[in-house]
């Protein structure tokens, strides 16, 4: 039932996308990222403590085992990839409509798919290849819809930011599959969360803090710590799914992109964004492509 775990992850990931948009609107992006990462780390600290002192058994689902120095290095690399993806994605989300950003992020499985074929030699069915073509076609249509809002997919730097964020996210997804073949999922999620904070602290202190009065000021919102909490829950189910030896990273990633439905709906309702009808049609096309990817793995 690894695919069901991926669906649950998608639900929480959709909520995560919404609280991200609420948090970064007219706000400083880098401290938002730092605070949200700290909120995740705080949750993992007591779990790490009870695991380290063997207060819970090693067979417990939440047990965090010790890992080698080399494995710590691999998780630090994962954190670097994710932090890069987040910086690009969060800045794009601040300046672009959620109903533009979320469908672009939904194309992540395509790039993960390419890597999965090359690295893990995953075999795709005819339905899955059709799904790829359909998803790419409707992604192109989204670029046309963006022009009606004055957003050029070719010249707008924030569009390139979200594309780069999506590509780095795809790299992270492939790397996750590799990591989970060798490292316990709880160790991956826990130490990755700690390393995020370690990376964001110097970034905030060097890039944002010296110019905090000139650039966007940081405004506290209760949605900010919720970013880390909802992502933690989404990732818990995501890593659980990937740890199954029968899981396919391309399909897990595709199912996770179903979170776009939640994010898109809230973007239309809460933020009163434009061209919802047209975007809904194009989003439907992307979801049809994703559905074919999923259907292809069950036939």
Image: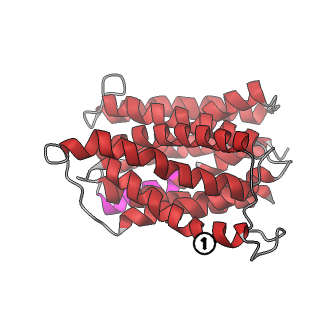
The quadrant in which residue 185 appears is bottom right
Picture coordinates of residue 199 (x, y %)?
A: 46, 44
- Magenta: main secondary structure: helix
Q: Is residue 262 located in the magenta-colored stretch of the structure? A: yes
Residue at figure coordinates x 41%, y 37% from the top left: 88
Seen in the picture, residue 156 relative to 292 is either above or below; the reply is above
Relative horizontal placement of residue 252, taking residue 126 as reference (left or right): left
Task: Say what secondary structure mark 1 lies in.
Answer: helix
Picture coordinates of residue 87 (x, y %)?
A: 41, 41
How crowded pointer 1 is (Cα within 10 Å; few <14, some 14-19, many 20+) is rated as few
Relative horizontal placement of residue 101, taking residue 155 as reference (left or right): right
Question: Can residue 116 be seen in the rendering of this structure?
Answer: yes
Given residues 64 and 297, the one toward you in this image is 64
Relative horizontal placement of residue 204, taking residue 106 as reference (left or right): left
Q: Is residue 114 located in the magenta-colored stretch of the structure? A: no
What colour scheme has been applied to the protein in the rendered image?
secondary structure
Relative horizontal placement of residue 98, taking residue 170 as reference (left or right): left
The quadrant in which residue 75 appears is top right
Picture coordinates of residue 109 (x, y %)?
A: 62, 38
Residue at figure coordinates x 80%, y 48% from the top left: 247
Residue topped by disc 1: 46
Magenta residues?
A: 260-271
Q: In the picture, which quadrant includes the N terminus? A: bottom right
The quadrant in which residue 202 appears is top left
List the single residue furthest toward the left. 214
Residue at figure coordinates x 39%, y 33% from the top left: 161
Picture coordinates of residue 19 (x, y %)?
A: 40, 61
Residue at figure coordinates x 42%, y 36% from the top left: 162
């Amino acid at each position: 039932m690894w695919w069901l775990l991926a669906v649950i992850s998608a639900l929480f990931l959709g909520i995560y996308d919404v609280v991200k948009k609420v948090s970064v609107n007219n706000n400083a992006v880098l401290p938002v990222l730092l605070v949200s990462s700290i909120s995740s780390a705080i949750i993992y600290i007591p779990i790490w403590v009870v695991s380290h002192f063997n207060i819970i058994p090693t067979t417990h689902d939440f047990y965090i085992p010790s890992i080698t120095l080399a494995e710590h290095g691999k998780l630090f690399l994962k954190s670097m990839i994710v932090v890069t993806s987040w910086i690009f994605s969060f800045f794009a989300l601040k300046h672009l409509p959620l109903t533009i950003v979320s469908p672009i992020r939904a194309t992540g499985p395509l790039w993960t798919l390419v890597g999965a074929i090359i690295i893990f030699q995953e075999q795709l069915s005819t339905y899955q290849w059709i799904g790829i073509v359909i998803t790419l076609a409707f992604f192109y249509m989204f670029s046309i819809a963006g022009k009606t809002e004055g957003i050029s997919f070719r010249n707008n730097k924030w569009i390139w930011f979200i594309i780069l964020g999506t590509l780095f996210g795809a790299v992270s997804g492939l790397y996750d599959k590799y990591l989970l073949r060798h490292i316990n999922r709880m160790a991956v999620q826990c130490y990755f969360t700690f390393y995020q904070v370690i990376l964001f602290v110097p970034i905030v202190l060097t890039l944002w803090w010296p110019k905090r009065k000139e650039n966007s000021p940081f405004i506290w919102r209760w949605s900010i710590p919720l970013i880390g909490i909802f992502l933690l829950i989404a990732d818990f189910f995501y890593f659980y799914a990937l740890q199954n030896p029968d899981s396919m990273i391309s399909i897990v990633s595709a199912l996770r992109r179903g979170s776009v439905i939640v994010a898109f709906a809230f973007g239309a309702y809460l933020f009163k964004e434009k061209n919802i009808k047209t975007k809904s049609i194009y989003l439907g096309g992307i979801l049809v492509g994703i559905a074919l990817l999923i259907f292809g793995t069950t036939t």
